[in-house]
Image (cartoon, rainbow, N blue to C red):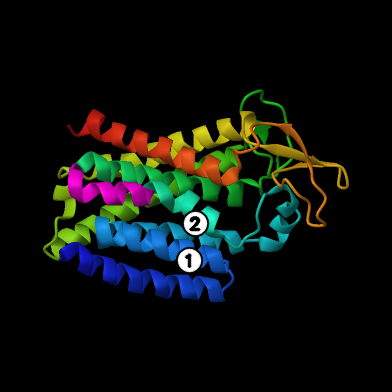
């Protein structure tokens, strides 16, 4: 019954936030549906501290996507999708967290919470790295070879992007800690759900985000599907140009698009977050 009530509240809050995001053009219609599904599941099975952590990621990433949007508009042709998140992006960013939330009531182990923080920290860190890293004055370098590449290239890293990665992961760790402290003050499980620790949870955000973002960059530089558009003489993540012209696959696995890369890297961040628990708490 408790879970059913949480699912109902999660549906209400997720629907409200998705509606606002849709009206502000941060989500497409399918993206709003994805946000409602993931938000309801995470809030309903994990609890409100979990749900607020997801909301924190969404709000912060949406605000950053609007930051210097004009300067970043010229790079949009390299990315598979635009600034309005669709269903695939919603599941890619929140899917791992939703699966962990479903498992949590049955496992009830602090490591699952740490894994959730690591997963959310990864998608937040990756978003911060992308939104801020493309504004770096110096060109990024491919993580595998060190070769200078154009801003926005999959697998490219920069000093600014790396700092943004660390800050994004740390922000989620701190947010999760704050919500658990409030939960404890209101008579909930609070930090008992995290094994009674504080700094380790923040570390799960920082290290989980860094590890997941590293995997994201490695996948982007090696096996993510990258195409070549002859009309614009550029590499792109888009398999089809806006005019309907199919692009040529130049490297990577055709099925491994950016959504799959984000989902797999969030799973890696979840594993790193759980690893922090076993290394520092247990």
User: Secondary structure beneath disc 1?
Assistant: helix
Residue furthest left as drawn: 187
Nearer the observer, 185 or 188: 188
Question: How many labels sit on residues?
Answer: 2
Please state the horizontal and vertical placement of residue 182, each as a whole percent of the image. Answer: 21, 62
* Chain part drawn in magenta: 97-109
Which numbered marker is on residue 33?
A: 1
Residue furthest top as drawn: 145
Which numbered marker is on residue 177?
A: none
Identify the image quadrant of residue 158. Answer: top right
Please state the horizontal and vertical placement of residue 110, each as a whole percent of the image. Answer: 20, 42
> Which is more N-terminal, label 2 or label 1?
1
Q: Which residue is mark 2?
A: 90
Residue furthest right as drawn: 231
Q: Residue 41, relative to residue 173: is it above or below? A: below
Nearer the observer, 104 or 20: 104
Q: Residue 143, relative to residue 80: is it above or below? A: above
Within 10 Å of disc 1 (Cα), the crowding (few <14, some 14-19, many 20+) is many
Question: For this view, does 100 lie left or right of residue 133?
Answer: left
User: Mainly helix, strand or loop, the magenta region?
Assistant: helix
Camera-nearest label, 1 or 2: 1
Q: Residue at x 26, y 57 (%)?
A: 45
Please state the horizontal and vertical placement of residue 108, each as a whole percent of the image. Answer: 17, 45
Question: For this view, does 234 lie left or right of residue 141?
Answer: right
């Amino acid at each position: 019954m408790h879970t059913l009530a949480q699912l109902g509240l999660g549906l209400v809050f997720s629907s409200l936030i998705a509606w606002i995001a849709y009206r502000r053009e941060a989500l497409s219609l399918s993206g709003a549906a994805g946000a409602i599904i993931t938000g309801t599941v995470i809030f309903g099975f994990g609890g409100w501290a979990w749900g607020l952590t997801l909301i924190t990621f969404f709000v912060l990433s949406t605000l950053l996507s609007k930051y210097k949007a004009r300067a970043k508009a010229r790079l949009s042709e390299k990315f598979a999708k635009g600034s309005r998140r669709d269903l695939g992006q919603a599941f890619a960013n929140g899917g791992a967290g939703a699966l962990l939330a479903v498992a949590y009531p049955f496992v009830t182990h602090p490591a699952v919470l740490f894994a959730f923080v690591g997963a959310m920290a990864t998608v937040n860190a990756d978003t911060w790295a992308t939104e801020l890293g493309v504004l770096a004055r110096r060109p990024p370098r491919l993580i595998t070879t060190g070769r200078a590449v154009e801003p926005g290239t999959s697998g490219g890293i920069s000093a600014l992007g790396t700092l943004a990665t660390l800050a994004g992961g740390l922000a989620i760790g701190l947010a999760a800690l704050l919500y658990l402290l409030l939960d404890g003050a209101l008579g909930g499980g609070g930090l008992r759900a995290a094994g009674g620790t504080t700094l380790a949870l923040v570390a799960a955000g920082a290290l989980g985000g860094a590890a997941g973002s590293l995997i994201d960059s490695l996948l982007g530089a090696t096996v993510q599907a990258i195409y070549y558009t002859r009309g614009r003489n550029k590499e792109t993540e888009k398999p089809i140009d806006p005019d309907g012209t199919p692009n040529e696959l130049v490297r990577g696995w055709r099925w491994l698009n950016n959504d799959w890369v984000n989902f797999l890297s969030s799973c890696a961040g979840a594993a790193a977050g759980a690893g922090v628990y076993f290394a520092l708490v247990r």
